[in-house]
Amino acid sequence: MSLIGKIVFSIGFFLLSTIISCKNDEGPEVETIEDEITADSNILENGVPESDINNPLTITPDGSENYLNFDAEYIFDQESLHTFDLVLSEENLNLLNADPTAEEYVQGMLIFENDTLSPVGIRYKGSIGAFVGCVDGPNWFEPSGAKICTKLSMKIKINWEGRSEKFYGLKKLQFHSMNGDDSQMHDRAGYWLFRQMGVPAPRAVHARLNINGTYTGVYALVEQIDSRFVKENFDEGEGNLYKEIWPLNSEGTPYPVDHYLEALKTNENDNPSVELIRDFGQKIADASDEELQAIIATHMNINQIISYAVVDRLIRNDDGAFHWYCDDGVCTNHNYYWYEEPATQQLHLIPWDLDNAFENILFNANPVTPIADQWGSSRNNCQPFGYGPWGLPQKSANCDKLTRGWAKYTETYETLKTQFINGPLSVAQIDQQINLWVTQISEAHAEASILYEDVENEENWLNEISLFKAQLNKARQN
């Protein structure tokens, strides 16, 4: 599959002719983007805000807008394929494309059905894997340079420059490019499976995205994990949310306070205390192996965390919380959040970034991500060891005392694994969902494959769907 060069963007009329309708009377009434542009006197004929980049047009809502009167259920409706339009000045678009890895916001507009939001912040997003092969810098491990893929993951900041209004209850939109997932199903299927097992996880759907009137393809629209997310998913919504910091470091002790403060995603400006998660880590560090389960049961929902482990291991989410990558003897994990509820002293683990899940089920297809050990086992006397085609160093997850405590729930794990295999992971459930999603996006995918060389053609894509189902079948066989 070859990569095309930089796409030449031109700003023109939005040529959308399909009226997107709601599935029931409770959803917002929808108009075409062309109707919206015609109706809004603040938008010039070329679709660009009537202002320069230093003086963006501000559209003040009057309260009747659909995005103010409906919630995120409309955006994450599993039965809908929504289209989103971004409008940027040519200068701002060129700034983004010249250096996507800078991940710096520029000003633009979001047009969705019959509503226009301006200004909003727009940027590309991603870790190393998101940019591999998609920027023209020479070093894949330190991506740099200009955009060369058709799609890159994007983040839209609704609360831009003091905007207080939310977009269907959301403060940010995240469009994942799925460039590393030829099936285009990993994000949506993975989060769906976690949620079906009662694990707090983002919602995900597919979406179409236009930039300055040019259709760029199908993306995974994944719910942002933020203060709004925790308020919707937990009884106590005012606690601390942390990204990618574990209760214990690889040496088995809690991190310094400032490390937890740096990882905070809520309450950053409220003189927060991080003692709950540090105290939990210290209790685990001080406990004997026989005491681990009692401590965990006090501070965690056992069915929830063991369900997390069951789903994570059966879908081989090998780039997640149970892969301890090592560098110069220091080992860390990533792609997760923690949320703590202060009154109940409960902690919750939340999965994140599932684009590399599933791919190592049949064999270790990814040279970077494979986890060496089965759940609950360890090797090399808990010292780092090389593994996988590239021999990259990792450390057994079971050497972490918290993970080792979870692995002691063997009976619960086996019970929940059976429920998972016979329930959400069954052919009747997940394969049926995949069939529905394939039907939902097939026309949009076909359109992108005709326009762009770096999009799988229909035959290859359907072969990838068949491979994905084979991976799921192998997972069911454990």
Image: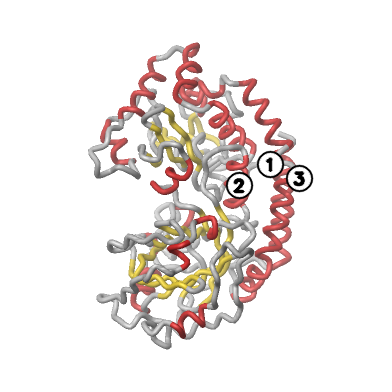
Q: Earlier in the sequence, mark 2 or mark 3?
A: 2
Q: CA distance from mark 2 to mark 1?
A: 9 Å
* Residue nearest the observer in this picture, 61 or 212: 61
Could one spot residue 3 in this view of the protein? no
Q: Is residue 426 left or right of residue 219?
A: right
Instruction: Identify residue type, mark 1.
Output: Pro
Asked if marks 2 and 1 touch (Cβ < 8 Å), the reply is yes
| 339 is higher (above) or lower (below) than 443 | above
Quarter of the rendering occupied by the C terminus: top right
Could one spot residue 362 in this view of the protein? yes
Residue depicted at 63% across the width and 26% down the height: 413
Image quarter for residue 183? bottom right
| 251 is higher (above) or lower (below) than 86 | above
Residue depicted at 45% across the width and 77% down the height: 212
Q: Which mark is residue 247?
A: none
Q: Circle 2 sits on which residue?
A: 192
Q: Secondary structure at mark 3?
A: helix
Q: Is residue 436 left or right of residue 68?
A: right
Residue depicted at 70% across the width and 67% down the height: 458
Residue at the right extreme, as displayed: 428
Instruction: Identify residue type, mark 3.
Output: Val
Instruction: Identify residue type, mark 2.
Output: Trp
Asked if marks 3 and 1 touch (Cβ < 8 Å), the reply is no
- The percent coordinates of residue 84 (x first, y second) are 50, 69
Image quarter for residue 439? bottom right
Q: Which mark is residue 424?
A: 1
Q: Circle 3 sits on which residue?
A: 427
Residue depicted at 38% across the width and 68% down the height: 96
| 120 is higher (above) or lower (below) than 416 | below
Q: Secondary structure at mark 1?
A: loop
